[in-house]
Image: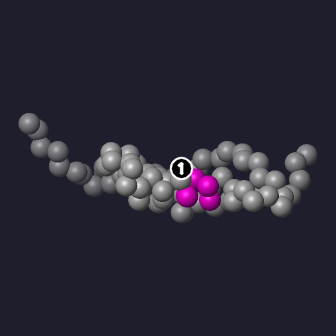
């Protein structure tokens, strides 16, 4: 088996931006896409019914990225 040593060049950080559109209606009980996604991932991570640790690990990783996002709102669609 060959050595899996990590080199400094492998530690480069890349920044990605993902843009998508979500509709949220005024005066709605809907918390919005990111808040709903956060609640879903948190429920998966802490659920006793989810027994697959890999799914919980994925939920935990996505949860961290949902917490560090930015919402840009547009008042009017033209």
- Main secondary structure of the magenta stretch: helix
Q: Is residue 59 left or right of residue 51?
A: right
Residue at the location (76% across, 48% down)?
23
- Image coordinates for residue 28, horizontal then vertical, percent: 79, 58
Q: Which residues are magenta?
A: 35-39
Is residue 33 in the magenta section? no
Q: How many marks?
A: 1
Q: Is residue 19 visible?
A: yes
Q: In the orientation shown, which residue stands out farthest toward the left?
A: 1
Q: Which residue in the structure is indicated by mark 1?
A: 16
Q: Is residue 3 left or right of residue 51?
A: left
Residue at the location (69% across, 59% down)?
31
- Image coordinates for residue 41, horizontal then vertical, percent: 49, 54
Q: In the orientation shown, which residue stands out farthest toward the front?
A: 49
* Image quarter (top left, top right, bottom left or bottom right) of the N terminus: top left
- Image coordinates for residue 51, horizontal then vertical, percent: 33, 47
Q: Is residue 1 left or right of residue 59?
A: left
Q: How is the image coloured?
A: one colour
Q: Residues within 10 Å of mark 1 (few under 14, many from 20)?
A: few
Residue at the location (33% across, 54% down)?
11
- Image coordinates for residue 63, horizontal then vertical, percent: 48, 57
* Secondary-structure class at tag 1: loop
Q: Is residue 12 visible?
A: no
Along the line of sight, the residue nearer the viewer: 47 or 77: 47
Q: In the orientation shown, which residue stands out farthest toward the top?
A: 1
Residue at the location (60% across, 47% down)?
18
């Amino acid at each position: 088996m060959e050595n899996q040593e990590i080199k400094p060049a492998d530690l480069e950080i890349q920044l990605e931006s993902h843009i998508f559109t979500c509709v949220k209606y005024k005066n709605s009980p809907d918390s919005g896409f990111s808040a709903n996604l956060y609640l879903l991932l948190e429920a998966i991570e802490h659920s006793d019914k989810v027994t697959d640790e890999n799914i919980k690990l994925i939920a935990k990783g996505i949860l961290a990225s949902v917490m560090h996002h930015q919402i840009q709102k547009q008042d009017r669609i033209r």
